[in-house]
Image: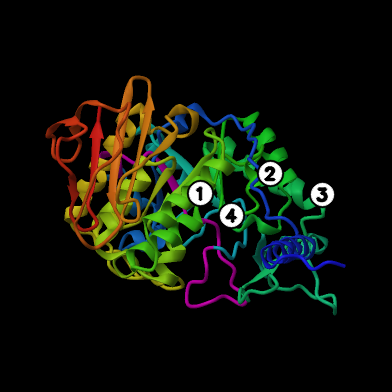
Amino acid sequence: MEKLPVSLLTLFLAVTILIAGCTLFGKKKEIKPLISEVVHPEWSKNIVMYEVNVRQYTPEGTLKAFEEHLPRLKALGVDVLWFMPTFPIGIVNRKGELGSYYSVRNFMDVNPEFGTIDDFKEVMDKAHDLGMHVMLDWVPNHTSWDNPLAVEHPDYYMKDSTGKFTPPIGTDWTDVIQLDWSKKGLQDYMISAMSFWVRMGVDGFRVDHPHNTPKEFWERARTELNTIKPVLMLAEIEEPYNYLEKGFDMNYAWELHHLMNSVAQGKDSANAVAKYFKKEWAKYPNNAYRLQFLTNHDENSWAGTIDSLIGDAQRMAATMIFTDQAVPLIYSGQEDCLNKKLKFFVRDPIQWDSCDLTGFYQSLIRLKKGNEALWNGDFGGPMVKIKTNRDNKVFAYFREKGGNRVIIFLNLTKKSVSFQPDLKGLEGEYTEYFTGEKAALPLSVNLTLNPWGYKVFIK
């Protein structure tokens, strides 16, 4: 056979390798867009969530003591209070002095360390009177060893090879035992227990670690709970994202959280953030909710404080999660410059004081709640990237809805940056939100941002 020219031979080999690679490894996985049929409660259109750690919130560590903070939180602007688990905590195999909130001994009572069920209802009723909503932290994956279910319904639990109860496999959660979600009786019980709280007035649930629970259960649960009142459902899970098809309103944006930490530490750039959002927009429809955060109880207690993980980039990162397509979360003490890792199994109260972040977060909340373009899901406008000549350093985007337009510029570096954004079609008179200065965009000169700087223009 006649030899192929070198150039053709090279091409032939390249194509052969490509075909072989596709055969061996398969084609590159395409993102399947989510189709969500969830109808969000109307009151969730512009919410800002706040995670309440009752044990560490006050020197007393009780619900009654926390109640005194409700007017302050109302003034801050948050309107959904997510309470870390308030259930009685297991004693058998307990971790530490007080145990983990997530070792549930009774799904239909309140931890006596915090007070009584009447105390909880009083706090919830006062929050409702102030126009806020209340969510409970639900723990469906496991129970404490001494939960009555272990005696009354041992068939609801997974067993090891010897037939004994077992902690969740692959974890060090020795204070809890794994539930078996293939049992219909367990599913019926969980819906009954959640319904108990919704009838009392609870407005929804943040569901802890739902990885081992079937999404079909949550679709059924949501349907049944909604017959009592419209509820908001948050899943502490990012994948599989199809939990948002019918069961949950919202899931965690863990990937973005870790990416922003990496950016703040100089390990990633604005290019990575742009790539992330390109994938986000391809995967999630505009009506889906995503929870974004700088910290939460897991990150604070185990990974580190905001100062240690993000440092000087905190205000820039906070500006992003309050203006992009997300439901923002504030953790207990974050608005007050919390600068320590709160211990998990013992008392470690927050030391409350005023700080320069309090007014900053208050202004961000006013911005989000007062501008329709920044509302959640279809209630707000889609997020559209703006090109600049410094896309490796600057992440820029705009959102528009109901005659409102907001343009955001973020410097994702620790050095000042001067750049030119492409604002074709976005020309006009704006006001920079944080300074109140008027500006005609596009500017006749380059726009400059300080290290980790940010500007938000409103029209």
From the image, state whether disc 4 or disc 2 is nearer to you. 4
Residue 296 visible in the current orientation: no
From the image, state whether disc 2 or disc 1 is nearer to you. 2
Above or below residue 382? Residue 257 is: below
In terms of secondary structure, where does tag 1 sit? helix
How far apart in space, not on screen, are marks 3 and 1 (Cα)?
28 Å
Q: Earlier in the sequence, mark 4 or mark 1?
A: 1
Residue position for label 2:
218
The answer to which image quadrant residue 216 occupies is top right
How far apart in space, not on screen, are marks 4 and 2 (Cα)?
13 Å
In terms of secondary structure, where does tag 2 sit? helix
Point out the stretch of residues depicted in magenta.
73-101
- Is 86 covered by the magenta stretch? yes
How far apart in space, not on screen, are marks 3 and 4 (Cα)?
23 Å
Residue at 83 percent across and 62 percent down: it is 155
Q: Position of residue 281 (x, y in %)?
A: 52, 41
- Is 154 covered by the magenta stretch? no
Q: Nearer the viewer, residue 81 or 23?
A: 23
Q: Which mark is residue 237?
A: 4
Q: Amino acid at mark 2?
A: Trp
Q: Which mark is residue 184?
A: 3
In terms of secondary structure, where does tag 3 sit? helix
Q: Which mark is residue 117?
A: 1
Q: Earlier in the sequence, mark 3 or mark 1?
A: 1
Q: Amino acid at mark 1?
A: Ile
Above or below residue 126? Residue 82 is: below
Q: Nearer the viewer, residue 289 or 41?
A: 289
Q: Which mark is residue 169?
A: none
Q: Earlier in the sequence, mark 3 or mark 4?
A: 3
